[in-house]
Image: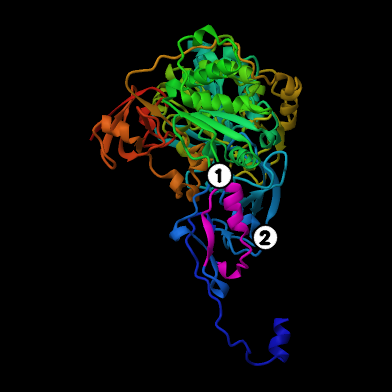
Amino acid sequence: MQDLAVGYGASESRYKEEKRVVVAKNMGPLISTEAMQRCIHCTRCVRVGEEIAGIQEVGMLNRGEHAEITTFVGRAVESELSGNMIDVCPVGALLSKPFHFKARAWELARRRTVSPHDSVGANLVAQAKMDRVLRVVPFENDEVNECWISDRDRFSYEGLYTEDRLTHPMIRENDGSWREASWSDALQFVVHGINAVREKFGADQIGGIGSHVATTEELALLARLVRSLGSENVDFRLRQNDARLDQAMAGIPWLGMPLTDLNKLDRVLVVGSFLRKDHPLIAQRLRQAVKQGAQVSFIDSAADDPLFDHVAGRITVAPSQLANAIAEVSVAAAQAANQDSPAAFSTVEVSELAKTIATSLASGERVAILLGNMVVSSDQASVIAANAAVLAKATGATLGFLTPGGNTVGGYLAGAIPVKGALTAEQMLAQSLRAYIVVNAEPGMDSDHGARAVETLKAATFSVALTPYRSAAEEWADVMLPIAPFTETSGTFVNAEGRVQSFKGAAAPYGDTRPAWKVLRVLGNLFQLEGFDDETSESVRDLVMSAGVEARLSNVINAAPALVAAPAGIERVADVPIYRSDALVRRSAPLQQTPASDKPAARMSVQTAEQLNLVDGDAVRVRSAQGEAALVVQLDSTVANGCVRVATAFAETAALGSSFGQLTVERA
């Protein structure tokens, strides 16, 4: 048509009016507005922000032909669901800034995959060109993620091809330097090193550590390998501090209901969760439930805004007092129903806040109590769970766990947890063993011990790292084996509702990388162990699932309810920021440029700051039992009194170690 118009049409345009020009706006590192001249003012992006993300960050400015979509007073879009604006834009006015101009849509091969970053297991389409993933978009599945994904799921692929990506096996020389090795030499080196430890110190000095972003197949083969070598020390839960929780659980902790039932709840109590950041798509489902009349209450240590129309009730207390706050609500619910409370709660005094939450829960028909990541990682997790079970029984509620990571349930199904009195991951990293096999984890950031975990691994006689990234292990490992991230391997994730989701690799392995399940299987062969004959990841998965899934899921708590004494000092409130949750996300440059990844501060209420004689902006030195960190005071009215909120999974705070416990804060 252009050729015909030039050849046979008028030589000049009859359009005399002022032409519309839209200047690109800065919406942050994730959304590009270079093509805003295409905008037809349908306001779909505005509605996504208001109705799905729960916050209006973009809107219409001016009138008539001068109307344009823009952000509020030039601010960047900061919602954890902002990328969905790109998907709903019908004309391509809003585009993915990291992907912009990298490829044409018809040049991309499309492969379905599953997100490893949180317990929803969002369905994704990874789009690749020349075996490199260049874009990730949602795959519509109403039973899991509907048509939405979080920005963490959408942009984490930017961490796949970083400078520190490990491309070849590496062996540490006696002088501490690294040399590149063939796979054959590296695997023989592993076999020799592990056998030397086993013969000299015994098999119980071997520990296997995984992570909740490893596939079910990887965790199953890790557990099989470690146990075949004679050790029971295997675990993937790097932030679980209460070993009593395993004895308290009758089965595998899970959501307690299908994800779709979250939209149908009319009363919900969320305990110990930074909900929007830990589980953005679950927060979105509860947001829709609130619009339909549901009442959601919170018991937490930092009153983050969930962006709901209304919060029915909220108790914000120090982390050590979460169990006692639940007990308060339980007693209030029992009193309202003329029921007896457990004897352990006899000294509980009920506050008005507790009565408000109890009244809300008692007025519902479809009620749920959801325990968040902070509960699971708490050193009082078993007590909190026991008290929550009492409350659930008193109110007729379903008890559920908002499990961390994309494959927590899969890790339990794979048997990658200690039994027979063996050591948990945190115990392995607290008391040095002689040999470690670490799969798909970055202990310095993923473990609750932080810098101490790295020192423990360095002190071991022999440490093996199966990792996609050199910087995740070069400080402590004796041999590094490059393994594929989720986009380059086949595997299975099991989400919080117990849904088994398998996927294939979306791109060819990078460099000399190999799928971790294959590496572990070959190691089993080289150790001459039985049971390592699997030719496909599907055969490993089928063996794990042969015992069934549904029958093994249970949130029944066998521990007795109790109260917890309050410590005297300042307590730490530790969150894992949304874009610091795992190694892949931490290496995504666009996500690290967002405000959610700003350097950590010592956040505290005005009352706590006055108690410590501090003001906003003061430089302070924060000390824990393990170490110290230099931070800046930031006043935050959402933090519980007597607490300091210090984010974890940062190099700046790794020395502090445990997310729970007492801190001392003094002006630097």
Classify mark 1: helix, strand or loop: helix
Q: Is 316 on the left or on the right of 1, as rendered?
A: left
Residue 619 part of the magenta segment: no
Q: Is 283 on the left or on the right of 565, as rendered?
A: right
Magenta residues, start to end: 35-61
In what quadrant of the picture does the N terminus appear? Answer: bottom right
Disc number at residue 152?
Answer: 1
Q: Quadrant of residue 203?
A: top right
Q: Are marks 2 and 1 in contact (CB under 8 Å)?
A: no
Classify mark 2: helix, strand or loop: helix
| Residue 584 at least partly seen | yes
Q: Is 251 on the left or on the right of 190, as rendered?
A: right
Label 2 amino acid?
A: Ala
Disc number at residue 105?
Answer: 2
Residue 243 higher or lower than 354, as above or below: above
Numbered circles on residues, count: 2
